[in-house]
Amino acid sequence: MTSSPAATRIRKPPAERREEILTHAAAIALEGGLERITLRAVAERLGVRPGLITHYFPAAEDLVIEAFVRAAVHEREQFFPTSGEPLDRMAHFIAHVESGASTPLARLWLNARHLSRFSPALEAALQEQDALDRERLTEIIEDGMRTGRFPVADAEAACIRILIAVDGSGSYVNSASETVHPAQDHVVADMAEWALGLDPGTLRAAVGALRHPIG
Amino acid sequence: MTSSPAATRIRKPPAERREEILTHAAAIALEGGLERITLRAVAERLGVRPGLITHYFPAAEDLVIEAFVRAAVHEREQFFPTSGEPLDRMAHFIAHVESGASTPLARLWLNARHLSRFSPALEAALQEQDALDRERLTEIIEDGMRTGRFPVADAEAACIRILIAVDGSGSYVNSASETVHPAQDHVVADMAEWALGLDPGTLRAAVGALRHPIG
DNA sequence: TGGACTATTGGTCAGTCATTCAATAGGCTG
DNA sequence: CAGCCTATTGAATGACTGACCAATAGTCCA
């Protein structure tokens, strides 16, 4: 539509072009899955010839991995607020998961978790990103423990339990059907309450308060 | 090894051949993943020409789906014991998951959950199998509720919570590294205790008793 | 302004995949 | 034992994929 069939060749500084490629590859991965990141698909989106992608990423697998990392890093910012009370930060995290806003990311993780079976390099990248998530979440929990807000004793154990709840409910992200049971919608909040030693309903209330702020 | 290069052509009754194809396809899926089910791969395993597979499965996708179902159905029997006290049956289920015996199946489910993104037919089959698992597990829970062994009120909610724990811990099945935290090894038992309203340690003990029976 | 560096192109190649179809031959039935 | 039915083969096709490489042309610098 926009460009003429034989568009004039545009030459960009390597760093910028590489950036551009990664951005579009990450977008493709989020939209359609990591296996849709092909030299041709990325090239077409950029209005460029496939050979150019090979020039920047001699091994296509590396592009896939870097695109995954980029998407994971970028989306993480949506999850973890930088400041606030530990309970609110936890509620924010859970609200983001339960709202469905994290669906594309959940799909991507499911995708990567499976694909890592065939690619040790992707597996390594995935574990690194996993560790970063654990770090962030553990921080929040430790904050809450310091202030006495979270009665739990072992922050890492709680973190792992919460993340397993997140991954577990994220398993169904590709199942189109409606929720099987109402409990499913709030599993993460419920399990987090249990994992953190909070009174039942504490987190659900905090999550609700986030959605309908009073003041 | 066994067959001569130009083996004589063996003609089998269609039902038997079809069965054979499905069995080998399911084996391939369990070993290397659903995407390894190719006409050529299956044919080679059977000592047969690819065209024959097409003859029985005109659309390759159907073979993949049926192979997945076959593997899922077959493996389910390993999970759910037919008789015994509800607590023991639950413990058996959890022991099977936590022992690592279910690893190949967990990999397969992860695989199918991701692939179902691209195939509505696979997605339907997957949901059907999912429902069967829920049914089996819910039965056990309802049994335990009837006898007063499980204090929980909502069997389906408990079932969903337990399965989410299973799927959540199954997410890491392709991550080669050792366990990050000891809590990870027993998440399913711990979460199940919580979901069923059992005293902490009840299920862990029951699982342990299964592994080291006294009498 | 001219020249060098290299980003970009265009084309090729080998590999994998599913699908299609006419020809072949195994084994049951009359 | 002859003949039919169809399970099975062999080969070709087209659509993908990543990788490779020589030719081309932007853009910056001397």
Image (tube, coloured by chain):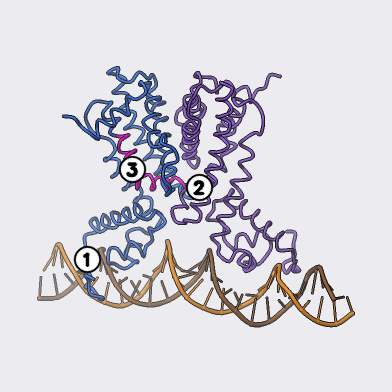
Chain colours: A blue, B purple, C brown, D orange
Q: In this image, B173 relative to A33: left or right?
A: right
Q: Residue at x 59, y 63 (%)?
A: B39
Q: Which mark is residue A11?
A: 1
Q: Which residue is mark 2?
A: B127
User: What's the amino acid at mark 1?
Assistant: Arg
Label 2 to label 1, Cα distance in Å?
A: 50 Å
Q: Chain of mark 1?
A: A
Q: What is the count of numbered marks?
A: 3
Which x, y percent locates residue A53?
A: 33, 62
Which x, y percent locates residue B33?
A: 54, 51
Q: Residue at x 57, y 20 (%)?
A: B205
Callout 2: helix, strand or loop?
Answer: helix
Label 3 to label 1, Cα distance in Å?
A: 40 Å
Q: Which residue is mark 3?
A: A100
Q: How many neighbours does mark 2 have within 10 angstroms: few (below 14), some (14-19), or many (20 or more)?
A: some
Q: How many neighbours does mark 1 have within 10 angstroms: few (below 14), some (14-19), or many (20 or more)?
A: few
Q: Chain of mark 2?
A: B
